[in-house]
Amino acid sequence: MKEKGILIVISGFSGAGKGTLMKKLLQTYDNYALSISMTTRQPREGERDGVEYFFRTKEQFEENISKDGFIEYACYCGNYYGTPKKYVEEQLEAGKDVILEIEIQGALKVKEQFPESLLLFVTPPTAAELQRRLVGRGTETEEVISNRLARASEESEGIEAYDYIVINDDLDVCVKELHALVDASRRAPVRRKEFIKEIREELKGFAKGAE
């Protein structure tokens, strides 16, 4: 029987490089599946529907909410973001480690529904580097950048809820570190319930034989 995959929730400040990190992780290792979120925000240049996101109208999104079609959803900077339920469950059963890239409030909702999920928070080494990356994108106005930095300040209050912090300074190093954390987390008792159950049963058998 194939071992069930791990649900990995990755959050981080806007501008922390989460997208680039996920892309490199998927290119380097073959056991990951990236969950595609649904959003009502407009696509950025080069983004494709069904690849980076499922781009939907507010009405379409709210219809999916009414059908209980999300693991979690949240409103961020005026737009909805949500994690479609069906895809995630199928990939986990197939043994894939599924990555959800979502905001803090969504991450905590996932942890409530899936206590075995692994929560990782991605951050640049300093706040000054975060500001530099946001400005360097060249895709947002000064007002949007200020809003994102203000949002990051709020988000920093919730970092303790995560299992690990991943500092995205050197991309290659960060990818290896993230993969090592996921690999190590497989050995946590909460994710080895079947193994624990089996070995207990065997030991009980030995104990009875010794009586």
Image (tube, rainbow, N blue to C red):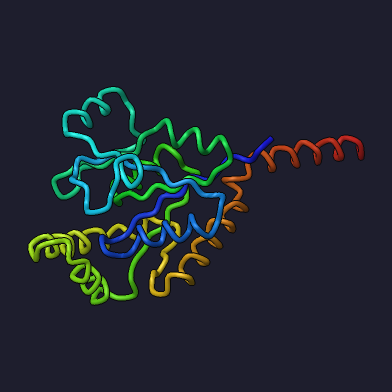
Q: Residue furthest front?
A: 46
Quadrant for residue 71, please give it: top left
- On screen, residue 67 versus residue 22, left or right, reads left
Compare residues 142 and 128 and report the one nearer the observer. Answer: 142
Q: Position of residue 193 (x, y in %)?
A: 63, 41
Query: Which quadrant of the rendered structure holds the N terminus?
Result: top right
Q: Position of residue 152 (x, y in %)?
A: 22, 62
- On screen, residue 160 versus residue 8, left or right, reads left
Up-down relation of residue 27 to residue 114 (above or below): below
Residue at 34% across / 66% down in the picture? 123
Q: Residue furthest right?
A: 210
Q: Residue furthest top?
A: 67
Total labels drawn: 0
Residue at 22% across / 74% down in the picture? 132
- On screen, residue 18 versus residue 156, left or right, reads right
Compare residues 99 and 210 and report the one nearer the observer. Answer: 99
Q: Position of residue 198 (x, y in %)?
A: 73, 38
Up-down relation of residue 45 to residue 74 (above or below): below
Residue at 39% across / 33% down in the picture? 85
Q: Position of residue 33 (x, y in %)?
A: 48, 46
- On screen, residue 142 versus residue 107, left or right, reads left
Query: Which quadrant of the rendered structure holds the C terminus?
Result: top right
Up-down relation of residue 122 to residue 51 (above or below): below
Compare residues 78 and 160 and report the one nearer the observer. Answer: 78
Quadrant for residue 63, please give it: top left
Quadrant for residue 4, please give it: top right
Q: Residue furthest left?
A: 143
Residue at 30% across / 51% down in the picture? 104
